[in-house]
Image (cartoon, rainbow, N blue to C red):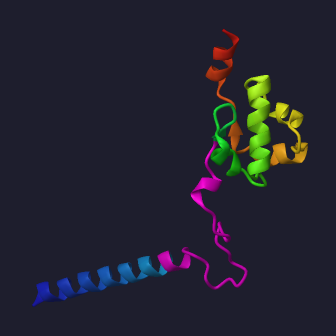
Amino acid sequence: MRKERNTGKVLLCCAAALLLLLTGALWFSVPFWQPEYRTVASEPFAAHQMEMVELNSAGIDALCSLPGVGEKKARAILEYREVHGPFSSLDELEQVDGISTKSIEEWRSRLYIEADEMQKEER
């Protein structure tokens, strides 16, 4: 009889501990009780909007994935690259017709120039 009482107390303590644990988890989880709460990404986005684009090897589709770049601007970048060779810096994009400094700043987080490509051209 004594073992049954001890077992009951142990089970009761375990149940109380579990209840406290679940209450704490709920309390520190998503603050659903705050009306101003928003998720980190409140606007949907596609994965292609986040991929990096290598400026000297990108095709028209990759360039068109940049914000504000349509087929016309992408073709202008490709034509400039054909005439003048690979870009040595992102700032050189200012030389392309229809591309502003503001656009380049928007694209900095998505564009890069592979160092190996520049070294190959120098040889």
Q: Position of residue 43 (x, y in %)?
A: 68, 70
Residue 52 lies in quadrant: top right
Q: Nearer the viewer, residue 118 or 76?
A: 76
Q: From this viewpoint, is residue 87 visible?
A: no
Residue 32 forms part of the magenta stretch: yes
Q: Position of residue 15 (x, y in %)?
A: 32, 84
- Seen in the image, is 27 located left or right of residue 107? left
Q: Nearer the viewer, residue 87 or 23?
A: 87
Up-down: is 87 above or below 65?
Answer: above
Up-down: is 28 above or below 78?
Answer: below
- Seen in the image, is 18 located left or right of residue 86? left
Q: How many marks?
A: 0
Q: Residue at x 73, y 80 (%)?
A: 36
Up-down: is 33 above or below 66?
Answer: below
Q: Position of residue 3 (x, y in %)?
A: 12, 84
Residue 26 forms part of the magenta stretch: yes
Secondary structure mainly formed by the magenta segment: loop
Q: Residue at x 54, y 74 (%)?
A: 29
Q: Residue at x 75, y 30 (%)?
A: 81
Residue 5 lies in quadrant: bottom left
Q: Residue at x 63, y 15 (%)?
A: 120
Q: From this viewpoint, is residue 11 visible?
A: yes
Up-down: is 114 above or below 23?
Answer: above
Quadrant into which the N terminus falls: bottom left
Quadrant into which the C terminus falls: top right
Q: Bounds of the magenta span?
A: 25-52
Q: Position of residue 91 (x, y in %)?
A: 84, 33
Residue 111 lies in quadrant: top right
Q: Nearer the viewer, residue 82 or 33?
A: 82
